[in-house]
Amino acid sequence: MGRTIAVANQKGGVGKTTTAINLSACLAEKNKKVLTIDIDPQGNTTSGLGVDKNSAENTIYELFLDECSLEDCIQNSVMENLTVIPSNINLSGAEIELISMEEKEYLLKNKLDQIKDDYDFIIIDCPPSLNLLTVNAMVAADTVLVPIQCEYYALEGLSQLMHTIDLIKERLNPKLEIEGVVFTMYDARTNLSSQVVENVKENLNKKIYKTIIPRNVRLAEAPSYGMPINMYDGRSAGAEAYRFLAEEVIEREDEDAWL
């Protein structure tokens, strides 16, 4: 049975979409069958995996409104073993349209239950807010992966995110767990980055990945070419880091993999 991982942090600019794109691609590179779902109206994960978000006829928006089937909106990405359910700006008004629907928090889960066994991993990129779309992702997910930027305000808002996860676990998805925290945009040249890592480890009683994603120019360039980092520059530090993260995620089935 496949694992569904929601990549979430309501704080913007923490490397959430970068992580969703490149974790998906590195899992696919390891011969895992991966479906990446973009539920962010910005559609950056969609375009970052080589799908034209503006010309996509069937997206997650149409799926939520029952205007298309799952098969209609699953598209091939630039990588083998990796397919995408795209998103675009149409999704930005979805929350208002979904509010009157019955069991609106379960819309995504009910769709994914039909195909979950077809994949090794389903990765969901959430919008940078704790809205109904993010709730749908967490209700559908087994675990939540939280990227944290190595900067001064790293812990700001994190308690709110953890509280939301706890509420969803209590009321909507009792099986939901924290997949782990991954540090992003680490700059080895500054003391601040290492201080942030230590501070979070001291203050956060959650699983923290050993892999730390560096601040990397090639990582920043790759999305503009519609490619994940392992295709754009497979030898870069960013590509190596996401490969290590993919290995850790695969090992996550065995709790002994954690220190």
Image (cartoon, helix red, strand yellow):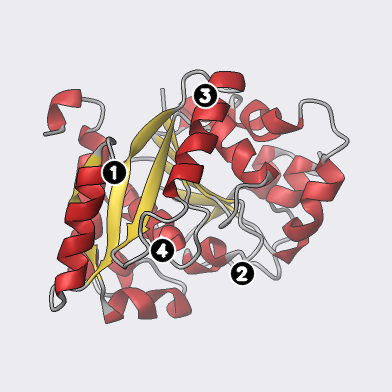
Q: Kindly report which numbered mark, 4 or 2, lies closer to the viewer in this rendering.
A: 4
Kind of element beneath mark 1:
loop
**Position of residue 13 measured from the top left corner of the image (x, y, whole percent):** 46, 68
The image quarter in which residue 223 lies:
bottom left
Q: Earlier in the sequence, mark 2 or mark 1?
A: 1
Q: Earlier in the sequence, mark 4 or mark 3?
A: 4
Q: CA distance from mark 1 to mark 4?
A: 28 Å
Which quarter of the rendered picture does the N terminus lie within? Answer: top left
The image quarter in which residue 148 lies:
bottom left
The image quarter in which residue 111 lies:
top right
Which quarter of the rendered picture does the C terminus lie within? Answer: top left
Q: Kindly report which numbered mark, 3 or 1, lies closer to the viewer in this rendering.
A: 3
Q: CA distance from mark 2 to mark 1?
A: 24 Å
Residue 31 has which mark? 1
Kind of element beneath mark 2:
loop
Please give the residue where the numbered disc 3 appears in the rendered image. 169
Q: Residues within 10 Å of mark 4 (few under 14, many from 20)?
A: many
Please state if 161 lies on the left or on the right of 255 as rendered: right
Residue 14 has which mark? 4
Q: CA distance from mark 4 to mark 2?
A: 24 Å
**Residue drawn at point x = 81 percent, y = 39 percent:** 66
Identify the amino acid type marked 2: Asp
Q: Earlier in the sequence, mark 1 or mark 4?
A: 4
Q: Residues within 10 Å of mark 2 (few under 14, many from 20)?
A: some
Q: CA distance from mark 4 to mark 3?
A: 24 Å
Q: Is residue 236 visible?
A: no
**Position of residue 229 measured from the top left corner of the image (x, y, whole percent):** 31, 68
Please state if 114 lies on the left or on the right of 33 as rendered: right
Q: Looking at the image, do the residues carrying marks 2 and 1 touch, with CB atoms under 8 Å apart?
A: no
